[in-house]
Image (cartoon, grey):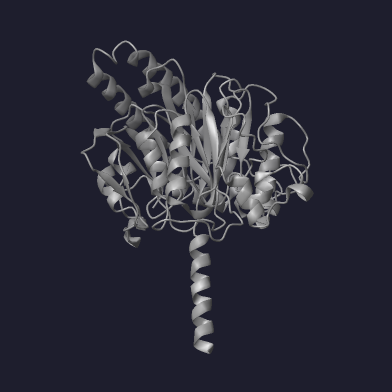
Amino acid sequence: MKRLLIFSFLIVYSFLLFAFQDESGFNCSTVIIGREASATGSVIVAHNEDDGGNQIVNFYKIPGKDNRKGEVIKFKEGGVEPLGSHSWTCLWFEMPGQDFADTYVNEHGVLITSNACTSRELYGEIKDGGIGYELRRLIALRALSARTGIELAAYLVEKWGYNGSGRTYIIADKNEAWLFAVVRGKNWVARRVPDNHVAFIPNYYTITDVDTTDSDNCLASKDLIKYAIRRGWYNPETDGKFNFAKVYSSERNLTSMSNIGRMWMAVNLLSGMSYKKDDAFPFSFQPRKKIELEDIFNLLSNHYEGTDLDDSKNYTKGSPHENKTQNICASHQQLSFVAELRQNLPFDIGIRIWFAPRRGCVNAYMPIFFGVTEFPSNMAMDNPEIAYELHFKRDQSIYDRTRPMAWWNFVAVAECTDQDFIKRYPERKRTKEDLQKTFAKMAARVEKEYLPIYKKQPQKAAALINDFTKEVIEKTIDENNKFLKQYNCLK
């Protein structure tokens, strides 16, 4: 009997561990700016990817290709899904070994990234291990638009069942942005961010109202509300209007100050309003002014400066990355990016992404264009085909800092700054801002040179973008090395 109880406990423990495999507490922050809310008239998605432990980020360009009849993608958990007749060209930001950390952008400007949002669901209907890691890749390879990306995500989740606890995917293109909130199993809901609004997502569900009669702006699984009633999570007679976040979230996530604090900070900074921490925050809101790139860089670098959540007291008591309440710019941030999905430009330069490896508060945001065909060799450890094959098979040797990876240069800058944050951060901030201004001017020149030649001289146009990418990265690393050498942090 005793052995049976122990065995049963281990089974339950293992199940719960699997169910919450993607909810380690090392989470993300995302801001979505509708095209009428941005100063450039572009849809913008900005994201801090936060993951603990040893990490590394690789940067790849996946070529588009025609697929053979019967060609499939094999899921980590065992399922098999047919590929379409053609797979689109994609940019891929990869974190080896991670189930839910990668970001994709395809040639149609469809971007997919995500935030963990723990649900209350422990079971859910799952087929053959369900879908998780492969969801965003399939969207990137197939989707023509954000809307078709949402429809594909819904189809895949309802077919296989989602195998994480819960998550909000951001699926956007040059015209619009959507939030796709999924719960373990086959329930989901999607809301469109209004064109003149901004939305911020910490690590809880932010979708509240569900009005599927407005199918232009809201979609959901058919069983979403009935399932909640059957499980005893929602009673229409006593609970009032259905609130997805309240009904499906884990209570711990909704009441976590790390989520509330980030939401409170972002909404107040961008809206110009004065919300209190215990207020009900909106799904989306009109910003106090058109959002500039600089506003986004500053938000992604926020450490609660000037608030009661800043344990560092404006850095006088150490690094703000030691705050008890998770910052928007967190200690475990691994990548920060701002993706401009610009209209009325060829997609190779219309999709412009500013990315900062490790922490964006101290590392410069470097612009790259979708048209880059190759990254410098020190920005990735393999080609994209091998990387995908080995994504879950890497060993600890990839974290050896003697390997010739630029990643470790950016890690060193973050570590060196934290050693004496109050003294070194102002210097790093000036350096990165100067670099970003330089890069903006360089990017404008590249775009001007690119437009007359991209149709008649495509190889020359591609070389122009590749050379620009290489120059931006080299210039950043040169400045990083000056800083590291100055403080004896260069190894």
Q: Is residue 242 left or right of residue 4?
A: right
Residue 68 spot, x, y in % from top left? 20, 38
- Number of marks in the rendered image: 0
- Which residue extends farthest top? 452
Q: Is residue 12 above or below residue 470?
A: below
User: Residue, x 54% and y 54% (percent of image)?
Assistant: 26
Q: Position of residue 441 (x, y in %)?
A: 45, 20
Q: Position of residue 471 (x, y in %)?
A: 34, 30
The answer to whether residue 455 is seen in the rendering is yes
Question: Is residue 196 or residue 404 the one in the foreground?
Answer: 196
Residue 129 placement: quadrant: bottom left
- Residue at 74%, 44% (x, y): give it: 307
Q: Residue furthest left?
A: 68
Decide which of 463, 184 is in the foreground and name it: 184
Dividing the picture into quadrants, the one containing residue 121 is bottom right
Q: Is residue 125 above or below residue 286?
A: below
Q: Position of residue 167 (x, y in %)?
A: 54, 48
Q: Is residue 459 left or right of residue 154?
A: left
Q: Residue at x 52, y 32 (%)?
A: 45
